[in-house]
Image (cartoon, coloured by chain):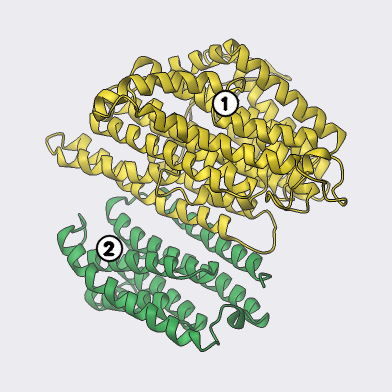
Amino acid sequence: MFAFLSSFSPKAIAVGLALAAGIVAAIGSWRLALLAFLAQYLLASLLLVQLIGLQVALTKALVGTSIFFALYLTAHQLSKGGWERIEGQSSPQAAFNSAFRLLAVLLVGLAVPSLAGRYPLPLVSPEMGLACYWLGSMGVLAAILREEPLRAGLGLLSFLLGFELFYVALEHSLSVLTLLGVIDLLIGLAIAYLALARRSLP
Amino acid sequence: MIAGPSLLIGLPLAMVPIVYLLRRWEKLAAFLSAVTTAAVAGLCLHLPLDRPSWIFGFVVDLGRTVRVLGREFALLETGRLTIAFVFGVATALFLFARWISQGRSFFPLGLLILGLLNCVILIRHLLFSVLFLATASIIAVFIVQGGRRGSAEGAFRYLMSTILAFPPLLVSIWLMEQYALNPDEVGLIHSAIAFLMVGFAIFLAVVPFHGWVPAIAAEAPPLVTALILTVMQAIVLLLMLNLLGSHLWLAENPRFFWTLRVVGLAMVVWGGFSSPFQRDFGHLWGYAALNDMGWVLASLGMTSPSGLSIALWQFASRTVAMVMGAMGLAVMRHRARGEAGFAQLRGAARRLPFSAAGLILSGLSLAGFPFTIGFPSRWAAFSLVASHVGNWLKLGAGWPLLLILADGGVAAGYLRGLNALLSSSPDPDLKPEPALTSIVILSTILLCLVLSIYPQPLLVCIRSAAGSLASPSP
């Protein structure tokens, strides 16, 4: 299994990560965004298999899947209460908002490669460095562009994933990586909690 | 034999499930939480570090080192004073929350946060301190929201600030470790300092990363806001001071202290000039807290022997003022069905005189108004900054007026609020404040007035704390 998981090209994985991060930032549909978020974690786990080993990669995939299910259940509950109508996702303005977000993603996406080239990250390959910058930038962009905690929270988690992909190359301690995983889970729970708390806004 | 770190971390964490199960009975939960925190504070203050002691038939060695998964936990003098301070403040907050609910999760999660903060203080590895601090901050998001339905802006901004703050600190720590292995690579220091400053800037709400402070002050339960802006920021400051003490190259770097002065003064000005335009006590309190923290950072950045003592004095005064303000605001919001705007609280001082007095006096203390607890330390900080920074910034003789005007802005904001509280007739549905809370707030007011005239008892503690911390200097 390890050989199979290690056979994926890092470049292809990095492209997949970039696509998933862009979907999280730009797309209006919460279902697609959550699936893209899950894809981010699974692709990041594939990269980690090649970097530090199967055990840590599987843990990362497990953390991501747990957060995905928590947020999916939250979003599902919110959607029953007309969340998409409240957030304006079913209004005529939704198309304008999506176009604006797509434009923002493209603009930031144009800047990221030059940033990655000018300030290369130490101890990681250029493809990995670009993926980390991309995830971080798209994550911050998604958090800024969204008012609602669930969608903004996906952005923050993407930012954190980008950072952790880089940090794993610097720090291999299992206890550190475990604590980071715990932090990820707590953030996922906090996002779900805040999203549910906000739902009674008029 | 029970090792000190095991007891100091284990006791609050052990009480978490008990208090959680009893959370529906808030008075009992408050009592148990307050007893726990008072016990920890008492242990730190009264037990010696250099020899074991007998406590209720158990042998406790406070100074003993504990190793967990290869990491050391040890209590030093600095940590002892910090834990006593943190748990003392928490005791006051838990006791007051017995009368004015801050959400059922306040007590169990508060204890959990305090246990994690003890891990931050006691662990001998900076990397894990940062990770535990991040964990505690994320858990605090739940009590910031406090079970409230509606806007989650304050809690989300706080969550966002934590997520953006701790990665730069982790990178900085790695860079510092690399520099220790490669002392010839000076570029590593510059990068480490840059990341360090970004991380601490976000945690300490330095302008322009300050948005989360007014947001949580406006939305979070007041005692929770006080917990975050006093206890948690105290831990962040302690981390920064420990870094300065353990890394000589950082303590000798003039750029770091230059940055502290600049950001501190920027916070003083920004917080001060934003305050008069606020229309509710929550946001006003947040900007007043920013202004006050600016003075703490500016004093710390002065690098004189007295700078550290003045910064600690300023922070201690801030803590007392903020706890008093939190009590007053908690009662007012509770009676006014969650409202804290000037318009909604018109005439409220007639029904809630002690809460109004505590709130206004707290704000004036944060502004450094004469005859408040904040005045002596503010005067000392102002004298220190005004006498040094003018030469450094090459400004004209009148520039200290800007700082006075900034503090005046905070005072003006609170005087506007006082005008609203005293004007016209109060809402007839506004119930009078509970007698016991009035007594507690009045006692706190009297304490503040005494300490404003006679701050010597506070100064004894400050000198002890400053002596145990490494004094930063370039």
Q: Output the chain of dot 1.
A: B
* Secondary-structure class at tag 1: loop
Determine which residue is flagged by label 1. B369
**Which residue has dot 2 on it?**
A51
- Cα–Cα span, label 1 and label 2: 58 Å
Residue lying at the far bottom of the rendered structure: A92
Q: Position of residue A93 (x, y in %)?
A: 49, 85
Q: Nearer the viewer, residue B214 or B415?
A: B415
For mark 2, does the 10 Å Cα neighbourhood hold few (<14), some (14 to 19), or many (20 or more) residues?
Answer: some
User: In the rendering, at what x and y percent does residue A142 appear?
Assistant: 41, 70
Q: At 34% from the left edge and 27% from the top edge, which residue is drawn?
A: B398
Three-letter amino acid code at the position of disc 2: Leu
Residue A62 visible in the snapshot: no
The chain drawn in yellow is B
Residue B453 position (above or below residue A56) = above
Q: Quadrant of the N terminus of chain B?
A: top right
Question: Which chain, by letter, is green?
Answer: A
Q: Name the quarter where the C terminus of chain B is drawn.
A: top left
Check the residue under mark 2 and report the chain it is in. Answer: A
Would residue B474 be found to the left or right of residue B343 on screen?
A: left
Side (left or right) of B201 relative to B77? left
Is B428 positioned to the left or the right of A80 in the image? right
Q: Which mark is residue A35?
A: none
The image quadrant of residue B83 is top right
Check disc 1 and give the amino acid type: Phe
